[in-house]
């Protein structure tokens, strides 16, 4: 450290023993060798990795850090007419035990960095829908349109015009990063464009003909 003696309190400035200890310690430990690495790996949120991001997670208030609990993709036993997307036939799948199955998911550095930035923005959000929309656009940049709907009657909805990955849905519903007004019911809608069942006159930009897409269920 340059000018290390300036860090010594005036009452100890004339202590030969203490001054010698400070000077020796300054010679043994030179922080200049690692200051750039500290800045890149910890201090700068845009380049921080590993433990540096874990520290930032605690600073912005992410209680569980990069750990998220997401619904399991395990398929339960069912009947053939239910379709392969929701159930399986006999001799495959498992019996539903009545309890939701979850699994732990640890966000990668890039995903966790995005979550930290969104949580930091949420901490200073003014609670308006435009500010919520900016948060969504930051979190899912380049994925498609996403926005907040005010449904009235103390209800709001996050709408995504694209499919979410399981961990992304967990970020929205379980991480606590996205703000939610007190007493307001929040739901999530995934409505990918060009994949919702409809009629030909609606145009290919909003619906698909028979044999394509799925029924719109608003869930």
Image (cartoon, rainbow, N blue to C red):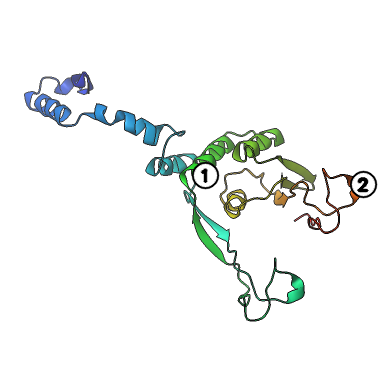
Q: Residue 149 falls in which quadrant of the image?
A: top right
Mark 1 or mark 2, which has the lower sequence index?
Answer: 1
Residue 54 screen position, x and y as percent: 42, 44
Q: Residues within 10 Å of mark 2 (few under 14, many from 20)?
A: few
Q: Could you tell me which residue is drawn at 83 percent across and 45 percent down?
A: 206
Name the residue furthest front: 211
Spatial separation of the CA atoms under disc 1 and disc 2:
40 Å
Q: Is residue 219 above or below residue 82?
A: above
Residue 215 screen position, x and y as percent: 81, 58
Name the residue furthest left: 16
Q: Residue 124 falls in which quadrant of the image?
A: top right
Cβ–Cβ below 8 Å for labels 1 and 2?
Answer: no
Name the residue furthest bottom: 91
Point out the image quarter for the N terminus. top left
Q: Secondary structure at mark 1?
A: helix
Q: Secondary structure at mark 2?
A: helix
Q: In this rendering, which labeled residue sits more in front, label 1 or label 2?
A: 2
Residue of label 2: 201
Q: Residues within 10 Å of mark 1 (few under 14, many from 20)?
A: some
Q: Could you tell me which residue is drawn at 57 percent across and 35 percent down?
A: 121
Q: Is residue 101 above or below residue 155?
A: below
Q: Is residue 182 above or below residue 12?
A: below
Q: Is residue 6 left or right of residue 135?
A: left
Point out the image quarter for the C terminus. bottom right
Q: Could you tell me which residue is drawn at 74 percent across and 75 percent down?
A: 80
Residue 218: give its label.
Answer: none
Residue 93 screen position, x and y as percent: 61, 75
Please name whichever residue, 106 or 151, is drawn nearer the observer in this view of the structure: 106
Residue of label 1: 111
Q: Is residue 152 left or right of residue 120?
A: right
Q: Could you tell me which residue is drawn at 83 percent across and 49 percent down?
A: 207
Residue 64 screen position, x and y as percent: 48, 51
């Amino acid at each position: 450290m340059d000018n290390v003696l300036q860090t010594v309190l005036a009452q100890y400035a004339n202590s030969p023993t203490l001054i010698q200890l400070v000077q020796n310690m300054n010679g043994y430990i030179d922080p200049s060798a690692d200051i750039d690495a500290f800045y890149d790996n910890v201090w700068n949120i845009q380049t921080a990795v590993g433990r540096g991001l874990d520290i930032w997670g605690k600073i912005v208030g992410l209680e569980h850090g990069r750990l998220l609990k997401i619904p399991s993709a395990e398929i339960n036993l069912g009947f053939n007419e239910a379709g392969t997307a929701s159930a399986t036939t006999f001799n495959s799948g498992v019996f539903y035990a009545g309890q939701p199955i979850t699994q732990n998911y640890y966000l990668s550095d890039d995903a966790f960095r995005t979550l930290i930035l969104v949580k930091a923005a949420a901490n200073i959000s003014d609670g308006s829908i435009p500010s919520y929309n900016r948060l969504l656009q930051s979190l899912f940049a380049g994925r498609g349109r996403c926005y907040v709907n005010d449904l009235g009657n103390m209800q709001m909805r996050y709408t995504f015009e694209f499919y979410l990955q399981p961990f992304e849905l967990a970020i929205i519903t379980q991480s606590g990063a996205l703000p939610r007004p007190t007493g307001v019911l929040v739901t999530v809608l995934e409505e990918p464009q060009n994949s919702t069942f409809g009629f030909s006159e609606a145009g290919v930009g909003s619906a698909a003909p028979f044999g394509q897409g799925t029924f719109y269920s608003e869930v």
